[in-house]
Image (cartoon, rainbow, N blue to C red):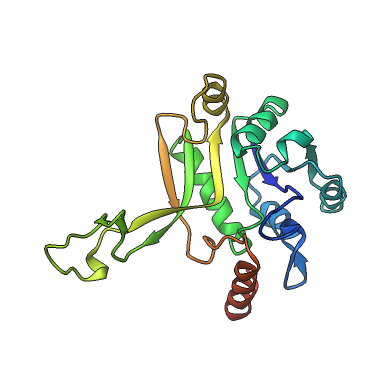
């Protein structure tokens, strides 16, 4: 069984109630639900939140609602904790987390991501954008050298993890968490799935939302 899960914590420090903010008149959480339904690749779709307001939205969109414990919805709780709690409650082979704050991720990209994870039998699959430009870390080149100037189109792209959508093999995740290890990257086979830059745009601030609005008006409804 493959489950699509949309996390939707009500509290947010940088953008209040961001999952309920609208993009072109549609709440971000609703966009994510409809995208998962349109993709047609999930056996079940769940909204995961501590707040009953999202239960009504889930019911109206004909998906299911998982009420996480309140202590897993504060600013201290980690994503690993609420994902683990969900997996201990719902039996599945693979869990796919689709973020509502990546509203420009498309249903075909969701479907392609799920097929990639199944076909290549990944333990973990991470969505990413490719940045084909000179990148450095702590002042040192990552994909270029100071010894020569290389045309950007000839550089190896940097894979920037976007978290727009993430997939996990459930057994690997649970085993790692219970062993006190990092569950997010648990398993021997970790893959990267390229999404376009629009799909990799994440909304965490008011400015991010404004950028998404501008991109949507320019590209058309995604």
Give percent across and percent down for residue 182: 49, 30
Give percent across and percent down for residue 119: 47, 40
Q: Where is the N terminus found, in terms of image quarters?
A: top right
**Which sits in the foreground, 38 or 140?**
140
Q: Residue furthest left?
A: 147
Q: Is residue 1 visible?
A: no
Residue 38 sits in which quadrant?
bottom right
Q: Where is the C terminus found, in terms of image quarters?
A: bottom right
At a point 60% along the width and 64% down the height, the residue shown is 104
The answer to whether residue 14 is above or below residue 1 is below
Q: Is residue 12 visible?
A: yes
At a point 38% along the width and 54% down the height, the residue shown is 159
The answer to whether residue 217 is above or below residue 152 is below
**Which sits in the foreground, 92 or 201?**
201
Q: Horizontal placement of 16 versus 212: left or right?
A: right
Residue 22 sits in which quadrant?
bottom right
Q: Horizontal placement of 159 versus 197: left or right?
A: left
The answer to whether residue 153 is above or below residue 30 is below
Give percent across and percent down for residue 54: 82, 49
Q: Horizontal placement of 164 versus 16: left or right?
A: left
**Which sits in the foreground, 120 or 215?**
215
Give percent across and percent down for residue 173: 54, 28
**Which sits in the foreground, 80 or 138?**
138
At a point 85% along the width and 46% down the height, the residue shown is 55
Residue 191 sits in which quadrant?
top left
- Number of labelled discs? 0
């Amino acid at each position: 069984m493959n489950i699509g899960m949309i996390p939707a914590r009500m509290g947010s420090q940088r953008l209040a109630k961001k999952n309920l903010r609208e993009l072109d008149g549609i709440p971000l959480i609703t966009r994510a639900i409809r995208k998962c339904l349109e993709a047609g690749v999930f056996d079940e779709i769940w909204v995961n939140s501590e707040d009953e307001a999202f239960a009504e939205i889930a019911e109206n969109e004909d998906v299911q609602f998982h009420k996480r414990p309140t202590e897993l919805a504060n600013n201290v709780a980690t994503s690993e904790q609420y994902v683990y709690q969900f997996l201990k409650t719902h039996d599945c082979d693979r869990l796919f987390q689709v973020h509502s704050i990546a509203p420009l991720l498309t249903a075909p990209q969701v479907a392609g991501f799920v097929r990639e994870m199944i076909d290549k039998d990944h333990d973990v699959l991470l969505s990413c954008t490719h940045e084909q430009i000179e990148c450095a870390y702590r002042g040192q080149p990552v994909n270029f050298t100071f010894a020569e100037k290389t045309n950007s189109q000839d550089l190896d792209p940097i894979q920037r993890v976007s978290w727009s959508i993430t997939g996990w093999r459930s057994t690997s995740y649970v085993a790692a968490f219970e062993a006190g290890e990092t569950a997010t990257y648990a398993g021997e086979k970790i893959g990267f799935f390229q999404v376009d830059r629009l799909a990799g745009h994440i909304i965490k601030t008011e400015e991010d939302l404004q950028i998404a609005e501008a991109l949507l008006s320019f590209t058309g409804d995604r």
